[in-house]
Amino acid sequence: MNIIQKLSHTEKTSKLMEKNNIFTFICNAESNKIEIKKFIESKYKVSIENITSLVYKPKLKKQKYKGFTKKFKKIYVKLTPGQKIEIE
């Protein structure tokens, strides 16, 4: 199971990275905070102070074809002071 899909990089998230040391990830909707914390700590070799999660439900799209967007979870990860994730 793929826990983290990508690192979210927008204007809002870049301001959070610079000021508050908060990184934003798009994750699998079924993964929980404990799994995500272990995965990020082992992959990036950092210690995490706090995790906040938001679940986005599927939305109906009516264009040429009807369908739904995917369900996903957005994670805000606050690192302990002095820690940093190197963005590739």
Image (cartoon, helix red, strand yellow):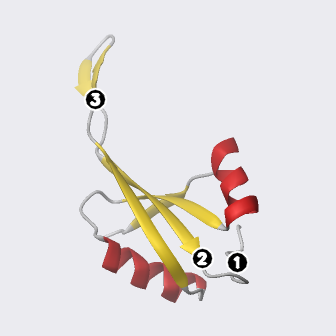
Looking at the rendered structure, the kind of residue marked 2 is: Leu
Quarter of the picture holding the C terminus: bottom right
Question: What's the CA distance linking mark 3 and mark 1?
Answer: 34 Å
Label 2: which secondary element: strand
- Mark 1 closeness class: few <14, some 14–19, many ≥20 residues within 10 Å: some
- Report the residue at 52% width, 79% height from top: 49
Question: What's the CA distance linking mark 1 and mark 2?
Answer: 7 Å
- Report the residue at 33% width, 78% height from top: 35
In the picture, the disc for residue 79 is: 2
Image coordinates for residue 62, horizontal then vertical, percent:
29, 14
87 shown above or below 49: above
Question: What's the CA distance linking mark 3 and mark 2?
Answer: 32 Å
Quadrant of res 81: bottom right
Q: Name the side, left or right, on which 63 lies relative to 41.
A: left
* Contact flag, marks 1 and 2 (Cβ < 8 Å): yes
Image coordinates for residue 10, horizontal then vertical, percent:
65, 44
- Report the residue at 72% width, 51% height from top: 15
- Mark 2 closeness class: few <14, some 14–19, many ≥20 residues within 10 Å: many
Q: Nearer the viewer, mark 3 or mark 1?
A: 1
Return the residue at label 1.
Answer: 84
Quarter of the picture holding the N terminus: bottom left
Looking at the rendered structure, the kind of residue marked 1 is: Lys
Q: Earlier in the sequence, mark 1 or mark 2?
A: 2
Return the residue at label 3.
Answer: 59
